[in-house]
Structures are given as structure tokens and as C-alpha cells.
Amino acid sequence: MTAGSTAASRATEDGRGSVAIRGLTKSFGATPVLRGVDLDIPDGSFLTVLGPSGCGKSTLMRIVAGLEQQDGGSVAIGGRPVDGLRPDQRDIAMVFQSYALYPHLTVFDNIALPLRMRRLDFARRLPIVGRMLPGVGQTEREIAQAVRRVAETLQIEPLLARKPGQLSGGQKQRVAVGRAMVREPRVFLMDEPLSNLDAELRVHMRAEIAQLHRSLRTTFIYVTHDQAEAMTMSDQVVVMMDGRPLQVAPPSVIYEDPEDIRVARFVGSPR
Ligand code: ADP
Ligand code: MG
């Protein structure tokens, strides 16, 4: 992928993509799922959340995204508390394991959808001003340009007229990433985005996501239970177990110097 020169790439030196998570707790019924999560994710960095199934990774992502409400603690993005804000007010985009593309829409329309929704939303809330402010209500022509830039970056231009049913798994995943990218979020949340792909394609897409991060310089929070994925892409890895981070460190440190026997067992390192 060659994202370096697109408008979707922007430096985030102003810190607007930093994420600070403090004392996050969440229970479903009587079952605690998050038991006090503290994490600091610097602007522009790549953090992988690694841990066994059921340890609370998706719940954590859904709370950061605003799709789920925490019981206690707080989340700040770019230094701004976002608790209580809707997902679309948080400057984040999320890519799930199930790509959730709209089967009746073309690839072009799937990617354009978030921008069209944003325009509708502004038009509804600010019927006159919304039309006058540049950027808030992008014209159809501007939207088309943004979709083409994203498609070029992800090398899916030839697919724009197709429907999701005519795409391979890897192509669908690229479209899902494109739909997240088009909003130019400060923070990307990816929850096991590759787990529906076959092994060979996973390795390929892993390299592409790492490349995407290098060129966009936005913050990535990437969830996986696959150690190889965590070890190859990340600046930092957090190993989670039973709703708590056990260790946060660069991948080599997690592997060579695990702080906890449970971390060592999970990553299968010699200690
Ligand atoms: P992970 O993504 O690490 O596999 P999850 O965050 O999805 O873990 O789930 C953590 C625990 O919370 C699991 O035991 C799961 O069954 C439970 N859980 C998740 N979402 C809900 C929900 N909406 N209602 C009840 N229990 C849930
Ligand atoms: Mg999960």
C-alpha cells in the first residue's frame, strides 16, 4: 500500500490521537469483565491488546468506541474526556472481525456511507450553517474524491463498482478498512480484523496494516489472540487476562522478559 501522499495521511504531533484509560470497570450481571484497566496510548503509536478469549478485549474496545457504557473509570481521547459522547463524536473508527459491509451497496457506496451520514447529520442539526461550513457537509464530488483516495491507498480501485458478494475475504477486509479510513479518524480500533481470513492472507494483511500505520501515523489499538500478529506490528503489547492488563511493554520485552508467569505461559516464552 502506498498511503504516504494521500490526504488521509496526516501527522498527529498535536497529541489529538492519544488515548488515556483510567480505572475502567465493567460487569455483565454479576460477572466482572473489566476489573480496573489503566492504559496510556501515545499519539500515533500502535498498541496491541493480546489475551485469551473471554478476557475482556472486545468489551474494552467497545467502551473506548462508545458502543458500550462502562460502570466506572474514564476514557480520554486527545486529552478530552469522551465518556457520554456518541461513537461518531469520538474521532475514532472501528474495524470488526465481521466486516459488516452493506450487501446491497457497491464498494464505492459502502466506503462513501460514513461521509454521507455525516453530511446528513449536519444538515439535520444545522440546516443552514451546515450547508455553508466547508468540511462538515462535503459535497458529493468531494466525497467521491475521498473515496478514490482511500481506494488508491488500499489498491481496491478496480473493485469500486462491485457488491460485497463479489469480493474475496481479503478484499472485503480492505473495504472495511477503507470505510474506517475515509473518516480520517485520529484513532483506529481493530478487533481481530483478520481472524476470518486464511493463514496466508493473514500474514499478508498483517504487513499491510503495519504499512498503513506507518504512513497514516494515526493511533492504532489492535486486538488479537494471535501472538505472531502482536509481535510483528506493535510498538507496545498489553497482555490482558481476566479483565486486567498484566504487562504493557514492547513485544520483545513481553517475550524475553515476561513479568508474570501467566504472561510467560500465554506467549510461550522460555521463562
Ligand atoms: P474477548 O474479546 O477477550 O474474547 P469479551 O470482551 O468479548 O472477551 O467478553 C468478556 C466476557 O464478557 C466473556 O465472558 C463474555 O461472555 C462476556 N460478555 C461480553 N459481552 C457481553 C454481553 N453483552 N452480555 C453478557 N456478557 C457479555
Ligand atoms: Mg473479542
Image (cartoon, rainbow, N blue to C red):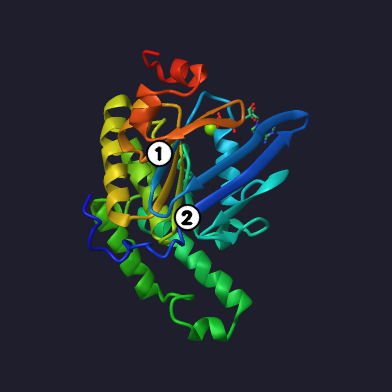
Q: Which residue is mark 1?
A: 236
Which residue occupies 32% across, 38% down?
233
Q: Is residue 106 visible?
A: no
- Indicate the secondary structure of the residue bearing disc 2: loop
User: N-terminal of the two: label 2 or label 1?
Assistant: 2
Q: Which residue is mark 2?
A: 18
Q: Is residue 158 visible?
A: yes
The amino acid at mark 1 is Gln
Residue furthest out toward the top: 270
Nearer the observer, 58 or 152: 58
* Mark 2–mark 1 CB contact (< 8 Å): no
Asked whether, in this view, residue 51 is left or right of residue 159, the answer is right
Q: Which mark is residue 121?
A: none
- Indicate the secondary structure of the residue bearing disc 1: strand
* Image location of residue 20, percent across then percent down: 55, 50
Asked whether, in this view, residue 134 is left or right of residue 252, the answer is right
Q: Quadrant of residue 204?
A: top left
* Image location of residue 107, percent across then percent down: 36, 53
> How far apart in space, not on screen, are marks 2 and 1 (Cα)?
14 Å
* Image location of residue 21, percent across then percent down: 58, 47
Q: Is residue 210 above or below residue 200?
A: below
The C terminus: image quadrant: top left
Asked whether, in this view, residue 29 is left or right of residue 268, the answer is right
Which residue occupies 72% across, 34% down?
27
Which residue occupies 38% across, 32% down?
230
